[in-house]
Every structure is written in C-alpha cells, then in structure tokens.
Image (cartoon, grey):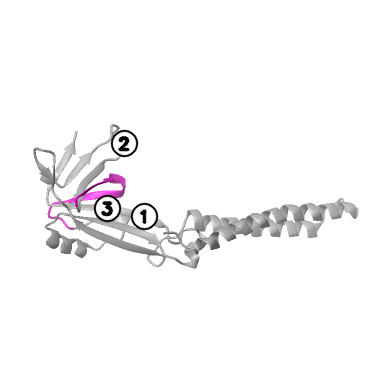
Amino acid sequence: MESAWNIVGLLLWIILVIYAIFIIHNIGVRRSRLIINGHYDFSLTHHLKTIAQIVVLFAGIGFMSFETFYPNVNGSNVVTTRDFKPLILDTNGNSSYYVKVKSGNNSSLNQSYSYLVNGQRLSVSSSASSVLVGTNSEINVQKSAVRWNDNEAKTLDKKYQRAWVADVTVTYKDSFWNGIGLHAGRQFKSYTLIRIPDNSFIYNEK
C-alpha cells in the first residue's frame, strides 16, 4: 500500500517545474528591462542572477532525480517481511514432486518454478527465486537479494522436513525521506526461496 508521504515528493517535483517556468519568465523580463533602459551590452548582475537561478534549479533536479530513481536502500528505510509455508507434494501421474521446473523456448529466458502450498499451485520466475536442494542449509544467492539468516533456514528444515517455501518482501517504510523519492509504502523487492530435500523432488517439464 502506498503512503500519503509520497505527496511530499510530488509537491517538490511540482515546485521544481514552477520554479523552472519562473526562471524562464524572470530571465526574459530582466533582459527586456535592460533593453528598454538602453543596456544592450554585457550586464554582470543579470548574468550572475541567471547563473545562480540555473544552479539552484539543476541542484534541485539532481537531488530529486537521485532520490526518485537511485534511492539508497538500507535496513533503516525498509521493512522486510517473511512468510513461511510447508510445501505439498504434487504429481504428474507417474511420480511425486515438490517443484516443477519449466524452461523457456530460448536458452536466455528464465525458468519458472511451480509448487503447491495450502492447496494452491503457485508459479514464480527464476529471476526472483531459487531452489535450495539437499542437506546444505547455507544460503548464498539469497543473501545478495534479501537479508537472510542461515539459522532461520535450519529451524524451518527441522519443522517442515526440508520442504518449505519462504516469500520475502522488502517494502519502503512510511517516512518523510522515502516520500521525497515517491517510494513510501511501495514494494522494493520480493524473493521466493523454495526448499526441497533432494533433486528427486524436482520435475523438469519438457
């Protein structure tokens, strides 16, 4: 859910647009006055004011662009939520499996992983998920995507016999600074970790 704090960022962008229009108008008015007063030559005051206005404008655009398109994401401005569910065995009529892997027609395309939880068949792209197989509980790929605790995986392994799925969602906090970049309350990233006992519980669809 988005936050009302994003109105702050919207207002700042509107102010920048209004300021840009004001600068253009102000430069024209000052230039016209110089001509009316017979000052056709170089005016230091006029040029210094113009340079100062343009510097302020570009500084504002640079700041807002950075906050909007290149936000600094850290543990202090986001909230991470984790939802854990046990996997349910699925079947293709011949064998049972926890995960069905489907590859795209092109080798460069991502795979998709399908699995059952709470009686629902869900599917995720390999670009935002991964499958953790076997007795190894050390999670490496996921650490680069979302914050993760290896001890948490070990606890889930004991509880669900190494057959579970974790949906991790990272959302921007509702705050003034996140609102400046129009990110408050919006989702930053989501990641799905699928845990299975071994490779025999994977079905590769051809």
The x and y percentages for residue 182 are 49, 58
**Quarter of the image where the C terminus is located:** top left
Residue 116 visible? The answer is yes
Residue 59 visible? The answer is no
The residue sitting at 15% across, 41% down in the picture is: 203
* Residue that carries the numbered disc 3 in the rendered image: 192
The residue sitting at 38% across, 60% down in the picture is: 171
89 to the left or right of 148: left
Figure quadrant of residue 142: bottom left
Pair 3/2: label in front: 3
The residue sitting at 66% across, 56% down in the picture is: 18
* Residue that carries the numbered disc 2 in the rendered image: 108
18 to the left or right of 27: left
**Quarter of the image where the N terminus is located:** bottom left
Q: Assess disc 2: are there few (<14), some (14-19) or many (≥20) residues with their C-alpha within 10 Å of its C-alpha.
A: few
Q: CA distance from mark 3 to mark 1?
A: 10 Å
Pair 2/1: label in front: 1
Residues drawn in magenta:
119-137
- Check disc 2 and give the amino acid type: Ser
**Is label 3 in a helix, a strand or a loop?**
strand
In this view, the residue farthest toward the right is 38
- Check disc 3 and give the amino acid type: Thr
* Residue that carries the numbered disc 1 in the rendered image: 189
Question: Does the magenta-highlighted stretch encompass residue 110?
Answer: no
Viewer-nearest residue: 108 or 204: 204
Mark 1 and mark 3 in contact (Cβ < 8 Å)? no
The x and y percentages for residue 103 are 25, 37
Mark 2 or 1, nearer chain start: 2
